[in-house]
Amino acid sequence: MMTRETRLLLATIAVSLVVVLVLSTLRFPETPRISEAPPAPLERLAASAAYEQLARSVERVTRRVTTDLLVVRIDSGEGHGAKRLSDVLRSPVAADAARYFPALRVDEGRAVVTGTAAPGPASVTDQQGRDVRVIAIDPVRRVVLLAVPGASGIPATPLTVSALQPPTYVVVAEGTAAGIAFRPVFIGSADRFSDPRWTRPLLAVSGTPLTSPGALVFSLEGQFVGAAIVQPNDTLAIAGATELISVAAELGTPGMGAASDFGISLQPMTPELSRALAVPSGVVVASVEASGPAFQILEVTDVITGVNGTAVHTPDDALVRLARTPPGDVALLAIVRNQVSMSVALTAPSPSTEETVTTLATDALAFERVPGAGSIVTTVSPQSALGRAGVRVGDLVVRAGDLTAPTPLQLATALRDASTPGLLLIVRRDGDRDRVIAIPAAATPR
């Protein structure tokens, strides 16, 4: 039988245990359970699956569009001059003035390059080092149409810019010395905007690393989205595929693509000019060349408020819209003169034979006129007769025989008609160094 002392001891132990439990609960309250994060290996597995899917998409695009693309090397001619070691050490990046661009085949035998207004002076070669003939250049939109060998004649399927719905991935094709490089680029957001250089809206993607201008953009299904171009504020945008193909078609038409110069200079409207001219907005005519198509139609202090029905607010805007007027077409200007609103018509000038590039295909030679100075060599094959005589891309021909500052047409005629012993050319190289080059009669193109 349990004694009284035993019962008291057991009671004391029980009370002590209860007290200990109560104190432990107060000292260490139970914390709510937090859902556990997925194990790190599972996270890596999920990320790996996403990257593998994107890699497969890039591989699919590569297989689909590679035959539509080629790489061209555009040499600005800046690297042809004599250099000292100090020049190379001071500017190592400029030691090779060439850049590589991806060219998109638009039809049989032709391809288009964006992001450059070269050549002028420049030479264009393909990846095998073969000379590529320039068909036409659009200096306003910086698009070049090339004649290329071995074209498949199957252009990439275009995708309208409006059909691209960010956020999304695209595949960017870039030109490198080793060929076309493809990589995925994520476009988080994009705004569409108008630019006077282009007839269709552009896609603003300034925060997207599309690398250099001229990079071609494709959807993950291999459709051609457009090309990366540089805006006046040095930001990047995408010019749509249908627009580029349309520009290429225009450049293939003789007389199209050239920038129309109306012989005027414009300046922005300032508050002071606005008050003095009593015109709230527009651009002010600062000068009119006597030999230009605007002579006796526009006057200094005229205010241009619109071009072809579109209001203009900056000189760049007005000049670009005028420049895009095809030769022979009429540009309608809304102007204010002496506080009187009126409309005038300007006819875009036809390009003069003397001012265009004359190509002598028989000797892989081309010149471009430098007004008042002569003609600059824009294309010459080193293996050609003139190339062997020492003529180089970038040479400025300041004299040909008795002709001073010859135009391309005059120079072509002098080369063609040269008789024994040949023709003496005086060329200016590296800015201010003149040298005499003798072209044998047998070497001149016929």
Image (tube, grey):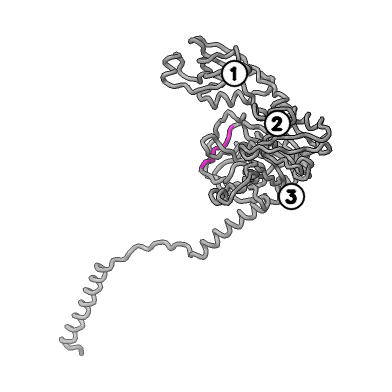
Percent coordinates x, y for residue 298 in the rendering? 57, 14
* Residue type beneath disc 3: Gln
Magenta segment boundaries in residue numbering: 201-206
* Residue type beneath disc 2: Arg
| Numbered label attached to residue 390 | none
Vertical order, 105 against 327 (above or below): below
Picture quarter with the N terminus: bottom left
Query: Considering depth in this image, is 144 or 342 the residue closer to the camera?
Result: 144
Percent coordinates x, y for residue 186 in the rendering? 55, 48
Residue 245 in view: no
- What kind of element bears circle 2? strand
Query: Considering depth in this image, is 303 or 399 the residue closer to the camera?
Result: 399
- What kind of element bears circle 1? loop
Q: How many marks?
A: 3
436 drawn magenta? no
Upstream in the sequence, badge 3 or badge 2? 3
Percent coordinates x, y for residue 276 in the rendering? 43, 14
Upstream in the sequence, badge 1 or badge 3? 3
204 drawn magenta? yes
Relative horizontal placement of residue 88, taking residue 276 as reference (left or right): right
Which quadrant holds residue 353? top right
Query: Considering depth in this image, is 193 or 325 the residue closer to the camera?
Result: 325
Q: Which residue is mark 1?
A: 289
